[in-house]
Amino acid sequence: MAFSLHSNIAVCGLDRRCSSELYCFRQDKGLFPRTRRSLRGCRFRGHRVSCHLELESLVRRKCCPYLEGYFLSSSNDPSLHEWSAVPDIWKSSAEKYGDRVALVDPYHEPPTELTYKQLEQEILNFSEGLRVVGVAPDEKLALFADNSCRWLIADQGIMATGAINVVRGTRSSNEELFHIYDHSERDKYGSGYPVMSRAFECLLSDALVVDNPQFFNRLAESFITRAHIRFVVLLWGEKSHLKSKFVDEMPIYEYKDIVELGQQSRHAFLNSWPTGQKYVYEAINREDVATLMYTSGTSGIPKGVMLTHQNLLHQIKNLWDIVPAEAGDRFLSMLPTWHAYERAAEYFIFTYGIEQDDLKLYQPRYLISVPLVYETLYSSIQKQISSSSGARKFVALMLIKISLLYMEAKRIYEGGVLTKENIQESLIIVVKDWLWARIVAVLLWPLHMLAMKLVYSKIHSAIGISKAIGVTVQNGYGLTETSPVVAARRPSCNVLGTIGHPLKYTEIKIVDMKTGEVLSDGLKGIVKVKGPQVMKGYYKNPSATSEALDEEGWFNTGDIGWIAPMHSMGRSRNCGGMVVLEGRSKDTIVLSTGENVEPTELEAAAMRSSLIQQIMVIGQDQRRLGAIIVPNKDEVLAVARRQSIVNDDSELTENKMMSLLYDELKTWTVGFSFRIGPILIADEPFTIDNGLLTPTMKIRRNEVADRYSEQIEQLYNSFIFHRNTMGLSSEKTKLRKYNFYYLKRGMSFYCLKRGIK
């Protein structure tokens, strides 16, 4: 605790007795009233002296050493000249790209356009405004809001105070948000505070930053009655639109209130410095926790991931190897702004003078998203081609196939063909292979360029990237626990089927699932990661932390994969060291036969069908795999009409829909050793609102299995494996095997010939 001492001396009359008073002020967020102690006066040469001493504690604050170095007393501190906290990046960006446009947000009222200088000032004002209303270092503030420029300002403003933001979007359920808020709440009697009565509990609770009044009204009844909230900040909208009866019970601030308070406080500080200072500032440390990010909870209750400033700074400094951005490039993210990948990418791009904006209006150069978005685009493209006339459809599909052949030949001569084999081919075979691929590519190149002009350009225009000649997709990999990026394909080495090489200062190893021994290249096992981006741990969950992180700092990702072997020449010469993923160990289905199946591979293949909107493979402890499918009913009906299965006036029965879906599954999973048997058509899509999708659009497998548990049981109970003897001879019985899948949904059944021996 730091103190300032102020004295006032008064000379009183001779031999007059008087008292001296020592006033001690402790201003720790208003928890303690000012205390006063009376002292006996002291006699000095026949006079009594009344000595009024004011002993005032300096309130502890934290600041970003590079962004707000003027708060710190030591100008020789090396941290003042480099990034130690994430918000430090804004000073560098403002100095380099000052008047360049950073953010465009036309979707909120008022529409916003901010330059880099303006963005830095907004963050500084918002941060100081939070300090004024009582936010202290290491506190946790819940930031429940969706994509907007003010989300970024709030996120960075909270971090700049040394507080920790706890983020989520508005589409999460009230119960999930309450769990996150309640779990992340600071210990009732946080460190540095004396034991006190429970009457002070509410003063120690965290604050809430929300999107708008409508969202606050939604939370009010079920959430706020159970939560201790010191104050609320509205990023958008006005307090007058709040309907909750709890409004009068807590301070409510609008966004502009916080910014104005911060602006006034900063102005007063600059005018009064260094006299009258009432605060002592500490620099935010790289190892300080910057944010709490809760996992999506696909397999249980979400866990709070503690990410430090160092974790996020590693991403900011090293993502350029993947995305060589330049000042003036336009960037668009299609992820929730609180998503780990979105946040890391957003911080990174703003250090290079990139503008964040809209897809069709501004034609961005970079598009950041998760595979689901590209799968949706793929489905839209397929639908567009399918709806074309017969001749145009034939030409389009033929040209696409030719392009695929061209790209395959190109991968061969460029050395980008993936293999698990460690054996190096002979020089003669390598040369022949290279020449053959070159010749094929040369022959197919004119048709590939024709496809680019006639087919791909129209597709680009349809999805809003008409100014692009080609679209390069760089796949990467990461987890919330790794801040998130672990590995990614580089522009110069974009090998299909891999997640690329590890980022700088990142190590990846593959270990045996049972023994934990490190495996050689080409062998499949559990992926483990070590590096500066690995989390500090799970908040309030030491058992989960020790399970995920070993003593040497290796993080168990729970993913199954392998590392491509090194080859000095040949079609795989540029693949060495790249990581390939094949599923999640926790998602592995163990059949009653003892065989292990990775469902994600089958699901990814099936999702390429335009008839399947969503799919979840099932079969734990069963003899065969099954699937729960959400069909794309419009597309299924269109296909049924094209194949004359139904007339234009008739409806598609469930039996016929089932038949079409089986055919699709056979077509798209033909290369797999496991086939999907019985299927169940879901009553409704998997969505965030019905609790079957996480906020990051992943299927909650446990929730789906619980929702359809009775139907799954009936599905497998009615499944019949039938062996029918087709012929007999005196010497030998010849058997032909058939699999019959009797799906008891009304009076329907479906029979599929499995094979003949």
Image: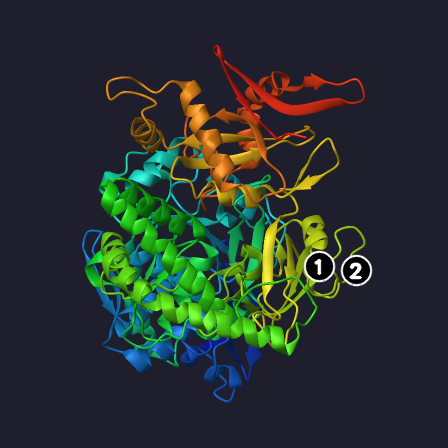
Question: Residue 160: percent from the left, percent from the top?
Answer: 43, 67
Please state which of the two labelled residues, at mark 2 or mark 1, is closer to the viewer.
1
Q: Is residue 608 left or right of residue 599?
A: left
- Please tell me which of labels 2 and 1 falls first in the chain: 2
> Image quadrant for the N terminus?
bottom right
Residue kind at label 1, given as amino acid type:
Leu
Occupied quadrant, residue 361: bottom left
Extreme-bottom residue of the structure: 76
Q: Considering depth in this image, is 152 or 412 the residue closer to the camera?
A: 412
Question: Residue 521: x percent and y percent?
Answer: 69, 65
Q: Is residue 651 above or below residue 360?
A: above
x and y, in percent, of residue 53 in the image: 50, 72
Relative side of 224 to 595, left or right: left
Residue 495 is situated, as x and y percent measured from the top left of the image, at 50, 66
Q: Amino acid at mark 2?
A: Glu
Q: CA distance from mark 2 to mark 1?
A: 12 Å
Decide if residue 201 is on the left or right side of residue 363. right
Question: Within 10 angstroms of label 1, few (less than 14), some, or many (20 or more) residues?
Answer: some
Front residue of this view, candidates 24 and 57: 57
- Front position in the image: 510 or 23: 510
Q: Which residue is mark 1?
A: 523
Residue under the point 55% across and 67% down: 311
Would residue 238 be seen by someone viewing this image from the given angle?
no
SS of the residue at dot 1?
A: loop
Residue at the disc numbered 2:
517
* Quadrant location of the C terminus in the rendered image: top right
Can residue 544 be seen at all in this image of the molecule? yes
Residue 627, by quadrant, is top right
